Amino acid sequence: MSSLGGISVIFDLDGTLVDSEPNYYEAGRQTLAEHGVPDFSWTDHERYVGISTHETVADWIERYGLRASVEELFTAKNRRYLELARSSTRAYPEMRKFVELLAAEGVPMAVASGSSPEAIEAVLAGTGLDAHLRTVVSADEVAHGKPAPDVFLEAARRLGADPAACVVLEDAAPGAAAARAAGMRCIALPYVAAQADAPEFATASLLLRGGQEEFTAHAAYEWLLNSVDLS
């Protein structure tokens, strides 16, 4: 057993492990432009950070009065996103270091994401993170996406881990809420700085208000070590 005892670590993917939001934005912008919405901005996109693609396109239909179906928009957006994901997704350097550090210690790890299985696979393969992150759960595989706890509880089940011994890394408020609902500790790194005061983040065990700029692999590892000492 590693020096981290029985801890398992579950990572959100988009905005936490990798900087994929620019790709999601571009895929959404192109899809909406094709359906008569030419001015979808980054600010518009920010309201969908941490929300599944199915829920996003369902909201688009209502918000923009689109005539397309959820499945039609989902397929179009996902196709565009996958093209971008395979070629231009960047893993956050300190997150990559953290994953490698945990892997060297033999800490069980999983990815639990609102993205489709195909998108998760494309990103992990494209960044090389699939070498260490082989347990993967998509919101498509469970009954409810975040903020429900389903993806995190399923990740713990596949790892054979007690939810109370799991630590989640999350960048979005719905994910922080999901971690709490799953009975897991959470390291929160808000992707959207203006959302750092969201009540969901206030429940995190560790809130890094500066997001990725404040995160270091060494400090996160030390925090995990201390959390073992305190438990």
Image (tube, rainbow, N blue to C red):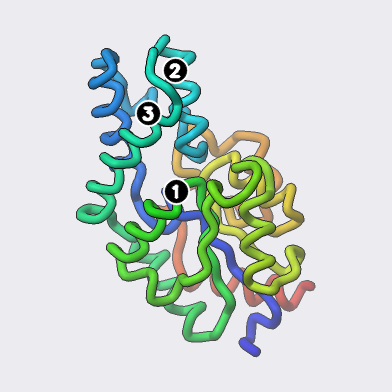
Confirm or deny contact between disc 3 and disc 1 (CB under 8 A): no
- Amino acid on which the number 2 mark rests in the picture: Ile
* Residue 29 picture location, percent across and down: 28, 27
Image quadrant occupied by the N terminus? bottom right
Q: Which residue is mark 1?
A: 116
The residue positioned 33% from the left and 60% from the top of the image is 91
Q: Nearer the viewer, mark 3 or mark 1?
A: 3
The one nearer the camera, 81 or 224, is 81
- Amino acid on which the number 1 mark rests in the picture: Ser
Q: Which mark is residue 72?
A: 3
Image height of 29 relative to 223, above or below: above
Specify which label sits upstream in the sequence, 2 or 3.
Answer: 2
The residue positioned 20% from the left and 55% from the top of the image is 87
Q: Residues within 10 Å of mark 3 (few under 14, many from 20)?
A: few
The one nearer the camera, 142 or 6, is 142
Image quadrant occupied by the C terminus? bottom right
Q: Nearer the viewer, mark 2 or mark 3?
A: 3
* Residue 162 picture location, percent across and down: 75, 69
